[in-house]
Image (cartoon, rainbow, N blue to C red):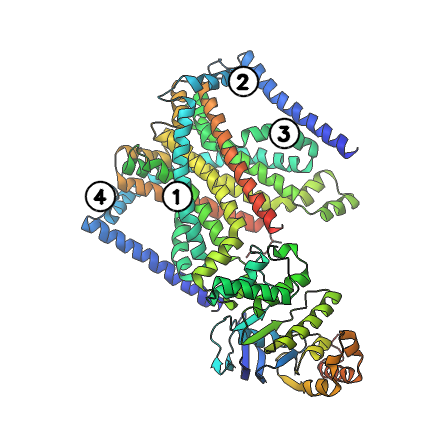
Amino acid sequence: MANIVLDNVSRTFGRDGKEFLALDKVSYVCNDGEFVAVVGPSGCGKTTCMRMAAGLEFPSSGSVKVGGKEVKEPGPDRAVVFQAFALFPWKTVQENIQFGLRSLGVGREEAAERIAKNLKLMNLEGYETAYPHQLSGGMQQRVAIARAYVLNPDVLLMDEPFGALDAQTRTVMQEELLRVGRANPRTVMFITHAVEEAVYLADRVVVMTRRPGTIKEIIDVKPVRDAEDWQKYERIEDVMDLESFVHLRTRIWRLLREQHGPGDH
Amino acid sequence: MGDKLQNRRLMWLSATGLLIFFGLWTFAAWVELAPRKFLPLPWDVVERGFALMSRPFSGQTLQGHLAASIDRYLRGFLLAAAVGVPLGLLMGWYRWLDNMITPLFDSLRFIAPIAWVPFAALWFGTGIGGPTMIIFAGAFPPCLINAYRGARFVEKKYIEAAQVYGASGPRIIYEVLLPASLPSIIAGLRIGAGAGWQSLIGAELIAANSGIGLMMVRGQGALDTSIVMVGMIAVGLFGLLVDVALRGVEAWVNHKRGH
Amino acid sequence: MSATLRDNARLWTGTATVVGLVGLWLIGSASGFISAQNFPSPEQFFAAAKQLVVGEGFADGRIHEHMLQSVKLILLGFFAATAIGVPLGLWMGWSRTAEALVNPIFLLVRPIPALAWIPLAIVWLGLGDAAKVMILWFAAFVPSVINSFTGVRSIERPIIEASAMLGVRGWTLVKDVIVPGALPSIFTGLRLSLQGCLTALVAAELLGALLGMGKVLYQAGLDIYPAMILAGMVAVAIVGFGLTAILDFVERRSMPWRTTH
C-alpha cells in the first residue's frame, strides 16, 4: 500500500488566451490505508486533484506523489473508478475485469481465481458473460469497482462513483463499499459532492473552497466513528440518525455554505 | 385512416409506380419511339440476359465476365481495406503519423480515382495490377477516413480507463480504438465497397480484356442496347448485394452493442 | 499541448513530409531508380505543365480550354440534375404518397453506378457533349435525391408540429421550414453529386472527347507521355479542388445559423 501526497499543488488552465487558476497551492495527504473523502462546490478542482494522482492530468506547480514517487503517468497501481463507469461496451463483464490483470501479466489461472473472488465480493456472480448495456447502472458500477479491486492496487481513486446512480441504488452501494472496504482496507481518495456520503464512508474529510480551489478545512471523522461505534449499525439510515453523525454533517454543510454569497443561487 | 389501411394504400401506390414505369417503357419501345435497336422492350433485355449466360459475347459468357469483374474487385477492395483500416487506426492514435499523412492525403483526395487509369494502363497493361490499382484508389479513401475518424473520436473516458488499467499504444489500438470504431469502420467499408465497384466498372470500360465493363463497351460498339442494359443490371445487382450485405453487418454490430 | 501548438506541429510535419517526398522524387528520377518511362522526373513534369499552360498546348488545346470544357459540362449536368433531384427528394421526404409512388423506380435506378450509364449514353447520343451531360446528370441526380430526402426526414418532429400549429402552409412552409431544415443534408448531397460528376466526366472524356481533362489524360496515355499524364492528373485535382471550394463557400454563406467545427 502507499500514500498520496499533494504538496503545494497549483493548476492553471488557459483558454482563449486567458488563464484560469483552478487550484491554488493545495496540500493534503491520504495516509497509508486511510479513506479520505474530498468534498467541495462544483468547479473547486476536487476531481482535478484525483486526476493528478491518477496521472491523467499534471500540476502546473507543486508535486503529487504516490508512495514517495512523483506521478508521471496512469497505471494499475492507482486504479480509478470513474463516475461514468467507463466500462468497455464491447467486452463482457469478465473481460472488463480482466483488463488490468493482463497488464500486470497475471497468469490465466490466477486471474480466473481473482476474478471469481471479486465477482462474489461485488455480488456479480452469474453475470460473467453479460455485456455492460445489459446491466443496470448500479451493476455497471459494481463491475467498475471489481475491475479496480481485482488488481489489489496500492491506491484506489474514486471520482463521484455513485453520482450517476439513483438514490436507492446509491445507498446500497455506499453500504457495500463500506463493508468491502472493511474487509480489505486500502488507501482511498474518494471525490464526492454528497456530504452525507463523505461522512459515512471516510476516515477524514477534506473540504475545499470554490475556484480557485484551496483547502478550507480537514475534518477527522474516524475518532468520532470509533468513539461512537458506528460500525455496530448495519444500515446506513441508522448511522445517519446518530447525533454524532448529524453534528459532523452539519458542520461540513456550513463550511460549504459559507462559500456561497447571498446572491449566489 | 388506420395504419394498416394506410400501408396497403402505399403498397398499391408503389406497385402502380412500377407499373407506370415499365408500362411507359414497353409502350415507347413497342411503338418504336426510337428504333428497336436503341430502345429494346424490357422483355428483350431479360431474354438477352439469359442468352448471354449460355452464349459467350466478347470472349466470355455473362457469368464469365461477372466472375472476372468480381475477382478484380475483391482483390482491390480487400487490399484497400487491409491497408486503409489499420493505417486509419494508427493515424488516429499516433499524432505524428496523422500529421505526416493527412496533408498528403488531403491533396491527393481531389484526383478522381479514374484519373489513375492512364498510369495504370502504362504500368500494368491489361494485367491484373491495373484494375486493382484503380479499385484501390476508389475504395481506399473511405476505408481510411472512417477508421481514422472513428479512432480520433473515441470517447476520452475509454482511453483513460485503458491507460489507468495499464494498456499502452498497441494494446489500446487493438482493444479499445478498433472495437470502439467498429461502426464507423463498417460504414467506411460499405462506402468504399460502392466506390471501388464504381471505379472497377470505369476501369473496365477503358482498359480491360474481360469483365462486365468490357462487355458493356463491346455492346456499345455493336450498338446492341440490350447487352448494354444487361450489363447495367448486372452491375447494379451486384453492387446492391454487397451494399445490403454490409448494411446487415452494420445492423448486427449495432445490435450487439445494444444500440 | 495547446491548440495553436498542435496546429503548428501539423503544419511543420506536413510540410516536411511533402518536401521529403519531392526530394525523394528528385533523387529517384535523377538516379534512374524511377524509370523515366514509368514516371516523369520533376523537370519533365514542369516542362509538360508549361506546354499545357503557356506553350502550344496538348490534345488540341491549352489547359484553360480543356478546363473550361470540362467545367462547362459539369455545371450543365450538375445543375440540371440537382434542379430536379433536390425538389424531388424534398417532395418524397415530405409526402408519403410521393415516396410510395416514386421510390420503387428510384430503387431500380439507384444501384447502377453513374459510370455504368456511359455505354448507353454513347449508344443513344453518340460521342459528343450531349452524351456526357446525360452521364453527368445521372451521376449528380441520385445523391441529391437521397440526401434531400434524408434531410426532410431528419427535421425534428416538434418543428413540424409547431409549423402545423402556427398555420404555416404551402410555399411558406417549403421556403421557411422544409428547405432550411433539410439544407445541411442537401449540401452533403450536392457535395457527393459534384464528386460524382468529376469522376464521371473524367471517365467519359477518357472514352472519347474532343476537348477536356479526360481527353488530355487519354491522349497522354496513348502517346505514352507520362509527364503529361501527371500534368493532367494535377489539372483534374485543381478543378476538383476549385469547384469543391466554391461549393463549400456557398454552403457556409447559406447557413449562417450553423456553427462550424
Residue type at the position of mark 1: Leu
Of residue C51 and residue A156, the one placed in the foreground of this image is A156
Numbered badge on residue C36: 4
The nearer-to-camera label among 2 and 3 is 2
Numbered badge on residue B79: 1
Q: Quadrant of the C terminus of chain C?
A: bottom right
Q: Are marks 3 and 1 in contact (CB under 8 Å)?
A: no
Numbered badge on residue A38: none
Residue B195 placement (x, y as % from top left): 46, 39
Residue A194 in view (yes/no): yes
Residue type at the position of mark 2: Pro
Can you identify the residue that label 2 sits on? B42
Can you identify the residue that label 3 sits on? C102
- Whichever of labels 2 and 1 marks the residue nearer the N terminus, that label is 2
Residue B110 in view (yes/no): no
- On the image, which quarter does residue C172 sit in? top right
Report whether C59 appears left or right of B246.
left
Residue type at the position of mark 4: Ala
Q: What's the CA distance linking mark 1 and mark 4?
A: 27 Å
Of residue B40 and residue A192, the one placed in the foreground of this image is A192
Q: What's the CA distance linking mark 2 and mark 3?
A: 19 Å
The nearer-to-camera label among 2 and 4 is 2
